[in-house]
Amino acid sequence: MSKRILFVEDETSVRGVMAGALRGAGWLVEEAQDGEEGLAKLQGAPGGFDLVISDVSMPSMSGPEMLQAAEMALGAAKILLISGYSQPNGALLAGRPVSFLGQPVATPDLLSRVKELMEP
C-alpha cells in the first residue's frame, strides 16, 4: 500500500516541483494551494494521510494554523513544515512531533527527510 502525502504550499512552482519529485519517488501526493484548501482536504478525509508537508507562511491561513484547526482529522499523520524564514517556536500540536526543513529545500534533502518520516 502506498503512503499518502498532503503537500500544502502557496507557491505554485515550488509545489509543482516538490510534489512531482515525491510522486517520482513512489508516493501518492495530493496538493493544496493554501492552508484553507489543506484544511478542507484534511477534514474531508480524516486520518487519510500518512504525512502532511506544509509551508509555514501562507496568506489567509498559515501552515501551523491549518494543522491546529485540523488536529482531530490528522489521525496518525506525521508533520513536516517547510519555511524560508525560521522554525516555528513552541508546541505546535500537543504530543505530536513536528519536523522542519528550511527553504530553499533541495530535492534530495526533501526525499531523504520524507523517507525517514515514512519508514516505520
Image (cartoon, rainbow, N blue to C red):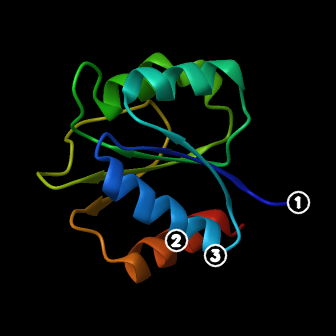
Task: Label 2: state its secondary structure.
Answer: helix
10 Å neighbourhood of mark 2: few (<14), some, or many (≥20)? some
Q: Residue at x 46, y 48 (%)?
A: 97
Q: Residue at x 42, y 71 (%)?
A: 110
The tag earlier along the polypeptide, 1 or 3, is: 1
Quarter of the image containing the N terminus? bottom right
**Residue 25's disc number:** 3
Does residue 38 sit above or below 44 in this rendering?
Answer: below
Residue type at mark 1: give it.
Met
Quarter of the image containing the C terminus? bottom right
- The alpha-carbon separation of the residues under discs 1 and 3 comes to 14 Å
Q: Position of residue 7 (x, y in %)?
A: 49, 47
Q: Nearer the viewer, residue 78 or 22?
A: 22
Q: Position of residue 98 (x, y in %)?
A: 42, 48
Task: Label 3: state its secondary structure.
Answer: loop
Q: Residue at x 62, y 74 (%)?
A: 24
The tag earlier along the polypeptide, 1 or 2, is: 1
Residue type at mark 3: give it.
Ala
Q: Which residue is mark 2?
A: 21
Task: Label 1: state its secondary structure.
Answer: loop
- The alpha-carbon separation of the residues under discs 1 and 2 comes to 19 Å
- The alpha-carbon separation of the residues under discs 2 and 3 comes to 6 Å
Q: Position of residue 94 (x, y in %)?
A: 44, 30
Residue type at mark 2: give it.
Ala
**Residue 1's disc number:** 1
Camera-nearest label, 1 or 2 = 2
Q: Position of residue 46 (x, y in %)?
A: 71, 25
Specify the farthest residue to the left: 85
